Image (cartoon, helix red, strand yellow):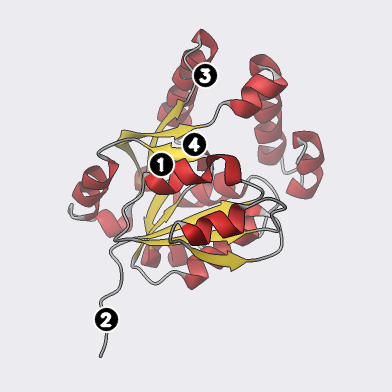
Amino acid sequence: MMTEPPPLSVVIPALSAAEGLAATLAALDPADEIIVVDGGSRDATVALARELGARVIETAPGRGGQLAAGASAATADWLLFLHADTVLSPGWREIVDDFVSSAGAAERAACFRFALDDGSPQARRLERWVALRVAILALPYGDQGLLIHRTLYDHVGGYRPLPLMEDVDLVRRLGRRRLTVLDASAVTSARRWRQDGWLRRSARNLLCLALFHLGVPPEWIVRLYGR
């Protein structure tokens, strides 16, 4: 007896992400296929993902390769790529359903609004800067999620096994005309900004982006990024 494919496959690359993974998974729809692609975690990430009902795939570390592996294993027509420390805001599923059912949706991709789980003025300023970057450059990062039909994903070549900038690489191939910002937020942990300093981390991210656009190999940029 054949079974219907799930309405959505959610692919989550993870590496020692147990601290925030439970909240990420709790916000998802259990009717969807949830795939956690682990890159060699040294904490309870794998056990926690399985305990919470996710399908786990174990691969070599490297988010680009992890995302590609998850996409290859997914069974739904629609793919949602999401970071392990990002929690989608209430009501996101209905907004995704509206987008998916709209005319020509399979020829477009979508991301969520960027938000941080921090109440500081620095967080609000960063959110405004990201919204401006997306509006002007059509350049969301992976922490805003990416919703895309498998046909379009395959057409543009999917995620490449890059150690860094795999999200920018794919979005550039999609182009502005095929990108929509959904009316829901992807709330990401601000831990790294608090840890590294708001200005320092933002400046480093901007430098990495500039170097990538100048053609510097991601393998070199990742040393600056500090992965």
Camera sees residue 159 = no
- The residue located at (26%, 87%) in the rendering is 2
Instruction: Read off the residue under disc 2.
Output: 3
Corner quadrant of residue 65: bottom right
Name the residue tied to disc 4: 139
- The residue labelled by disc 1 is 176
Quadrant assignment, res 87: top left
Alpha-carbon span between mark 1 and mark 3 = 22 Å
Q: In the image, what residue type sits under mark 2? A: Thr
Q: Could you say whether the residue bearing mark 4 is in a helix, strand or loop?
A: loop
Instruction: Give the CA separation, mark 1 to mark 2.
Output: 36 Å
Q: Residue at x 33, y 52 (%)?
A: 108
Q: Does 132 sit left or right of 200 as displayed? A: left
Q: Nearer the viewer, residue 134 or 194?
A: 194
Structural crowding at the residue carrying mark 1, measured as other residues with C-alpha within 10 Å and reported as few (<14), some (14–19) or many (≥20) = some
3 in relation to 144, above or below: below
Select label 4 or label 3 by which is in front: 3
> Position of 222 compared to 78: left or right?
right
The answer to whether the residues at label 2 and label 4 have Cβ atoms under 8 Å apart is no
User: Which residue is under mark 3?
Assistant: 126
**For marks 1 and 3 on the same chain, the one whose residue lies earlier in the sequence:** 3
Assess whether mark 3 and mark 1 are in contact (beta carbons under 8 angstroms). no
Say which label, 1 or 4, has the lower sequence index: 4
The image position of residue 124, as x and y in percent, is: 46, 15
Position of 180 with respect to 207 (left or right) is left
Q: Residue at x 51, y 11 (%)?
A: 120
